[in-house]
Amino acid sequence: MALNCKFYLKYPKKDFSCIFLWINHKPYKPFKYYLIAPHVEKAISIPTKCWDNKNQKPIKPSQQKYKIYTADIELTENIIGKIKSNIKHIITNASLNGIELTNEYLRKELDKRLEIKGKIQEDENPSLISYYQKKIEGMQDGSFVQPKNGKKYEQGTISSHTTCLKCLQEFDRINKRTTYFADIDNIWYDEYVKFLLEEQEIFDDKGKLDYVKEPLGANTIGSKHIKNLKFIMKRALKEGVSNSTEYDKDYFVRPREDSFAIALNENELNKIYETKTLNNKEEVTKDLFLVGAYTCLRYSDFSTIKPNNFKTIIRDGEIIEVIEKATHKTKDRPVIPILWDELKEILQKYNYNLPYINSADLNENIKNIAQRASISKIEEFHRTKGGITELIQEPRYNLISSHTARRSGATNLILRGYTYDEVRKITGHSSNDMLKNYIKIDSEDNAVSMAKNFNKDKKK
């Protein structure tokens, strides 16, 4: 069996380029192998003017300015000769011993025969993450500079790309996937934007909460994350690592709207509280969800409340029960008053030692419980998929998740007349503006609240 060995410049349009061997041998993927200088174990780079593309070999420099690279050019010619010779020996050895000529076998044998140590060959098909990491490393050490002016990247730009890389890593991790450039299409894009728009509790491989990812606004996603993703995809295309041009498609744009979310009003929470004939897991789901709704805590916090988090405060002769707990995200210790009778009854039911349920089970069960509680009003909202904005109609029970509890609690306290300053001391939001973006008061609840306050003022 003969293999047709070809040698190409990686960057034929630049002043300098490394060289790689290319073998197209079916049924395997094309084999790509970079020419490495054994003594330094780095890819050999020569002036592109000193390469004969037709005959696929270096040529002696004719111009004076290239003569200083004579040693590199001669080394390149020498290694090409060694590769061709060794490929013949590898094929003969494989044939005599019944060895399959896989890409892995070819690479291993060439490394051994050329005395190349370690994993220094470039990945033929790098994942989005691995390629992005290398580019950021290049920005940091100055080996990858701005294409237009040759200047190093500013620290702010590097930090922006590092943030985007971390989000991509978490997206892959929670979806148990590895994203390659060929995977990026309108479906992948919609899933990734949805991930960025929503608050995410990120768990490690052992199921322990790692950290909480803030929901990002549409403008931030567009001006930072999508912009940087387009940049890295263009670089990959230009360097021959990818052939994807999806970033030029109409759908690859800044999202037009923020994530749609609901809050349950007090009446809806009471319907859930009154739901009967539940199995044990559903009962725990119901109770823990309501604990979240009556404390304004995140799942990571309300699911880990312990007996020692309950305190009593005596003020002006009045005994006030509170929950004091360090939050996982901010490490603050909000003091949350136990205001609702329903919350007191749930705590007493478990003797202040709440059971545990994982977030996946809670998110699945609470939708079923809410459906049985007739929380079925149809919500209409717009969602952009593949660059096309659609009108979505969805029953409220399908829009409920563990985070709806916290949002509902904060919204209902505002509707009851508590100030934003008071509520954010419980929720931990850094500013009133942040909390206002979080509150979800629908038109009907707003009208009822206004009417009650108006009538209350009339009675004075």
Image: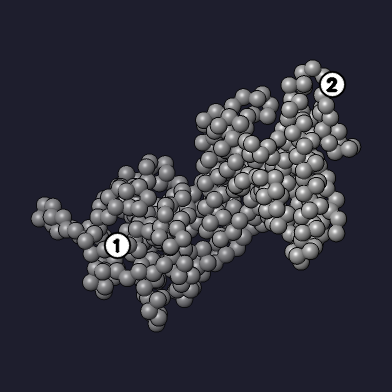
In the foreground, 443 or 83? 83
- Would you identify the image quadrant in which residue 290 lies? bottom left
Q: Which mark is residue 305?
A: 1
- Would you identify the image quadrant in which residue 140 lies? top right
Q: Secondary structure at mark 1?
A: loop
Q: Does the rendering let one see residue 315?
A: yes
The image shows residue 168 at horizontal and vertical percentages of 56, 49
In the foreground, 341 or 131? 131
Q: Nearer the viewer, mark 2 or mark 1?
A: 2
In the foreground, 41 or 449? 41
Q: Residue type at mark 1: give it.
A: Ile
Q: Earlier in the sequence, mark 2 or mark 1?
A: 2
Q: Residue at x 77, y 45 (%)?
A: 83
The residue most toward the bottom is: 277
| Image side of residue 278 versus residue 342, left or right | right
Q: Residue at x 24, y 59 (%)?
A: 309
The image shows residue 52 at horizontal and vertical percentages of 86, 33
Q: Label 2: which residue?
A: 62
Label 2, label 1: how far apart the Cα atoms are: 77 Å
| Image side of residue 365 versus residue 182, left or right | left
For the residues bearing labels 2 and 1, Cβ distance under 8 angstroms: no
* Structure colour scheme: one colour
| Image side of residue 358 versus residue 319, left or right | right
Q: Residues within 10 Å of mark 1 (few under 14, many from 20)?
A: many
